[in-house]
């Protein structure tokens, strides 16, 4: 069996892997491609013909679509065979998330059911709970929902007021409270509900059936986008929840919620890929049909720029999604060997990659917003018409920057979590940063005579890592423990970390492709433009950070080091983008 080097979460800042260590989408096997095709066929047959009807708040139509997907086996991808599923790898789960991501509101309902509606019970439930609920959720017999957010508790989930107290006979928890923004609320059969028992400081979790007396479902919210998804408030009025429906241990709810959020962020990172591919296909399809000034608009350089930039950002995000997905699979296998509970092993592996989960969530949601916006622009006035799919895609895209923790929260998590992991000794972040600081004036760009194309690109990436480490070292020395309150600087660091991880994943993918298929100019074009643009963004974020923490004496040295390390060789980005766009135009669809 092939052994790949796997990094710990956040360790990419100080360590490197070889191209052979990463998984790339071109490696999907036949079974994975067949599963993805099944999902595509389902969207074509059951979802796209019903989009207008389901957007008129037809709860039962959405529920019937979900149940049909369950009958096809689509709901059991993540669920082990012993509970009625297919027990597929995390990479395959992410491929399914990507493919269904093209399904607009259906994708939201489907992912909520398969992810946050089912997996908390699979991962944290006991055997009885798994048999009673997971086996039926995996087939679509039951539809699931997840109830965490409250009117007064958004990002600060642990401040929720929903309460549970033990009944006098000790057989039930009596649940009271209110939850909001609950996806699938209008037709869900099972609810994973978070509440505090008595005066506990932290949450516990419960499996609540919507048929229990006292569960009241509010009307669907009127939303900007994802209108076909049922989103409503749920009220719990003296709901008697059997004690055997406590999920996990008392007080473990906050941990469950955080772990499931990590999982949700990762899968959102895959989900947006499918939505972006649909928007790109719509963009190039329209550009190849629409004529202005006697030419198809796809022939114009300004349109080619837009098409190419859509492809570049999507291809880079996709590279990172499957890189970390395979790392999670590797860790899952190790943890399953170490402990007997497969469910706990799975969520521990997912939760470990919290830094990368936040990166995929932020970068992916903002990539899709860009792609969806440009899709509307390419369509011109027609893009603003409800007749076109890009109008719906534009509206539906916006929620992803709020879902699974806002992008503002996730940016802070990227930098803060990586530093906390390093403080625990998981990798030597601060030692490496200190070494660089000691050699500050001697730092060069490291250019070597006769370096190959890929050696040059990887050198740039190593230099970008050095810039990030210098900023972390300087910020920590200036602010100490107070750095967590300097959110602007934390965001500068997070921005660089996110860009770095995405670009390194892209470079590793291109290198691995070349080792198998030989040099293909279009992939080098994608990498060239990405690194060229990244150098400016890294320089800007680093300069903003350095100017925020460096003393007058240290500022020139740090700024000089940033300038040297951020420098890259110029490329003809106009021609590179044109070649990328021409490939898309010729294929008439995203086939990269």
Image (cartoon, grey):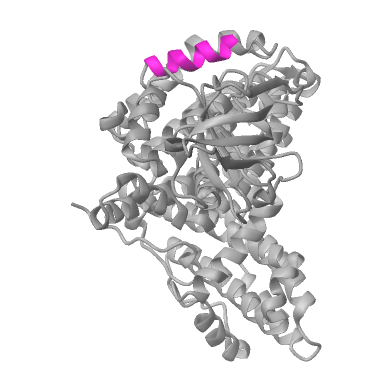
The one nearer the camera, 68 or 453, is 68
Vertical comparison of 476 with 493: above or below? below
Left or right placement of residue 563 versus residue 427 in this view? right
| Image-based side of 386 in relation to 69, left or right | right
Q: Main secondary structure of the magenta part?
A: helix
- Residue in the picture at 57% in, 8% down: 49
Tell me where residue 133 sits by quadrant.
Answer: top left
Q: Position of residue 359 (x, y in %)?
A: 57, 53
50 relative to 308, above or below: above
Q: Residue at x 81, y 88 (%)?
A: 552
Magenta stretch contains residue 540: no
The image position of residue 53, as x and y in percent, is 65, 8
Nearest the eye: 199 or 530: 199
Marks counted in the figure total 0
Q: Which residues are magenta?
A: 60-71
Quarter where residue 70 is shown: top left
Rendering coords of residue 463 (x, y %): 55, 72
Kindly identify the residue that appears in the image at 59 percent across and 29 percent down: 239
**Residue 73, located in which quarter of the rendered image?**
top left
């Amino acid at each position: 069996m092939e052994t790949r080097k796997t990094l710990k979460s956040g360790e990419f800042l100080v360590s490197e892997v070889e191209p052979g260590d990463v998984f790339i989408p071109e490696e999907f096997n036949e079974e994975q491609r067949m599963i993805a095709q099944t999902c595509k066929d389902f969207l074509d047959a059951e979802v796209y013909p019903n989009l207008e009807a389901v957007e008129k708040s037809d709860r039962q139509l959405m529920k019937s679509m979900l149940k049909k997907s369950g009958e096809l086996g689509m709901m059991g991808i993540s669920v082990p065979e012993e509970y009625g599923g297919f027990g597929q790898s995390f990479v395959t789960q992410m491929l399914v998330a990507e493919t269904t991501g093209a399904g607009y509101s259906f994708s939201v309902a489907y992912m909520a059911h398969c992810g946050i509606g089912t997996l908390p019970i699979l991962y944290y439930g006991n055997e009885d709970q798994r048999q009673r609920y997971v086996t039926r959720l995996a087939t679509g017999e039951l539809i699931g929902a997840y109830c965490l957010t409250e009117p007064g508790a958004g990002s600060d989930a642990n401040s929720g007021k929903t309460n549970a107290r033990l009944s006098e006979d000790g057989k039930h928890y009596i649940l009271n409270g209110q939850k909001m923004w609950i996806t699938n609320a209008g037709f869900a059969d099972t609810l994973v509900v978070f509440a505090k028992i008595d005066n506990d400081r932290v949450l516990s979790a419960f499996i609540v059936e919507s048929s229990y007396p006292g569960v009241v479902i509010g009307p669907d919210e009127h939303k900007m986008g994802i209108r076909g998804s049922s989103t409503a408030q749920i009220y719990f009025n003296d709901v008697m929840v059997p004690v055997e429906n406590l999920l996990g241990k008392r007080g473990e709810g906050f941990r469950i919620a955080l772990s499931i959020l990590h999982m949700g962020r990762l899968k959102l990172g895959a989900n947006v890929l499918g939505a972006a591919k649909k928007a790109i296909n719509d963009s190039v399809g329209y550009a190849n049909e629409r004529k202005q000034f006697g030419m198809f608009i796809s022939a114009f350089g300004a349109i080619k720029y837009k098409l190419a930039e859509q492809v570049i950002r999507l291809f880079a995000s996709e590279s990172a999604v499957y890189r970390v997905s395979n790392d999670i699979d590797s860790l899952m296998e190790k943890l399953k060997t170490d402990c007997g509970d497969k469910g706990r092993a799975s969520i521990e592996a997912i939760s470990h990659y919290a830094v990368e989960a936040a990166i995929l969530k932020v970068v992916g949601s903002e990539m899709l917003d860009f792609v969806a916006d440009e899709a509307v622009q390419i369509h011109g006035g027609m893009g603003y018409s409800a007749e076109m799919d890009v109008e719906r895609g534009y509206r539906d895209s916006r929620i992803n920057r709020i879902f699974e923790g806002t992008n503002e929260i996730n940016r802070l998590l990227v930098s803060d979590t990586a530093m906390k992991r390093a403080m625990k000794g998981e990798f030597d972040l601060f030692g490496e940063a200190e070494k660089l600081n000691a050699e500050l004036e001697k730092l060069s760009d490291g250019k070597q005579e006769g370096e190959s194309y890929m050696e040059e690109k990887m050198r740039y990436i190593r230099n970008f890592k050095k810039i990030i480490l210098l900023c972390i070292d300087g910020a920590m020395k200036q602010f100490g423990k107070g750095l967590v309150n300097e959110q602007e600087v934390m965001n500068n660091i997070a921005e660089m970390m996110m860009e770095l991880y995405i670009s390194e994943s892209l470079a590793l993918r291109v290198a691995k492709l070349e080792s198998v298929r030989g040099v293909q100019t279009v992939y080098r074009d994608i990498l060239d433009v990405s690194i060229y643009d990244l150098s400016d963004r890294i320089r800007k974020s680093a300069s903003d950070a350095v100017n925020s923490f460096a003393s007058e004496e240290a500022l020139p040295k740090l700024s000089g080091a940033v300038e040297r390390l951020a420098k890259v060789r110029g490329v003809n980005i106009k021609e590179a983008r044109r070649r990328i766009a021409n490939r898309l135009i010729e294929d008439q669809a995203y086939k990269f």
